[in-house]
Amino acid sequence: MKTYSTIFQQKIKLLGALIPLLLLSSNLLAQFTLSGDIRPRAEYRNGYKTLVSPNHDAAAFVDQRTRMNLNFMSQSYRVKVSLQDIRVWGSQPQLNTTDGLTSLHEGWGEVFFDTKYALKVGRQEIAYDDQRIFGSVGWAQQARSHDAAVFKVNSEDYTAHIGAAYNQDGASLSGTIANNSSYKAMQYLCFTVIYGYP
């Protein structure tokens, strides 16, 4: 049985092999960017999510999100891979070999059929407008991403995004089970009319 660490190492090796292929196969108008962020956050909790009882001790800790983003874009497609590590300072021993805290936040590919039509598939943040109803929850350390496909239509007068997702807990020989605190299926349409000045 493969451990989480072994699977993650295999994904990193695959990513390392794919990036040079993408760079070699693209034209000179392609662009590769590497970015990231380190976001430590100190928290003091006294009565958070519950009423304070007389024998209650307050909690204080520092948690941190470390994220690395790899973006590649050409005229006909773009690819993004975003790896993140979220941990509380001191939660792991100093001589730690593996902790299972590193995850794939985003990993998607988008194909541009022409200037009007595109298809984006993979693990991705889905956010619209001010992100109040449908957003990436960027204030949370882990943020939110979906395993989904989004078909995009962009014109001068309107934009339409049609998205769909179908989730499972894992691959199986029979049955479809999705109990991992997520939705089983999602479909949506976001249609925006663009008003201009005469």
Image: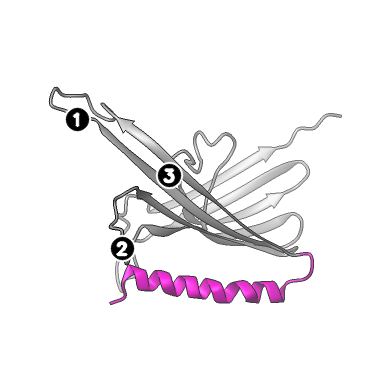
Residue 14, position as x, y percentages in the image: 51, 75
Q: Residue furthest right?
A: 198
Q: Nearer the viewer, residue 97 or 129?
A: 97
- Residue at the disc numbered 2: 96
Which quadrant would the C terminus be assigned to in this image? top right
Tell me which label, 3 or 1, sits earlier in the chain: 1
Mark 3: which amino acid?
Gln
Magenta-drawn segment? 1-29
Query: Is 98 in front, or is 140?
Result: 98
Q: Using the numbered discs, state the Cα–Cα distance from disc 2 to disc 3 in whole angstroms.
A: 22 Å
- Whether pointer 3 and pointer 1 mark residues with C-beta atoms closer than 8 Å, the reply is no
Looking at the picture, how far across and down is residue 184, in whole percent? 38, 54
- Judge from the rendering whether residue 9 lies leftward or rightward of residue 160; answer left or right: left
Residue assigned mark 3: 141
Dot 2 surroundings within 10 Å: few (below 14), some, or many (20 or more)? few
Please identify the dominant SS of the magenta region. helix
First along the sequence among labels 2 and 1: 1
Residue, far front: 94
Left or right: residue 129 versus residue 194 is left
Q: Is residue 97 above or below residue 43?
A: below
Residue 20: say if magenta. Answer: yes
Give the residue pinned by disc 1: 57
| Mark 3 to mark 1 CA distance (whole Å) | 24 Å
Three-letter amino acid code of the residue under disc 1: Asp
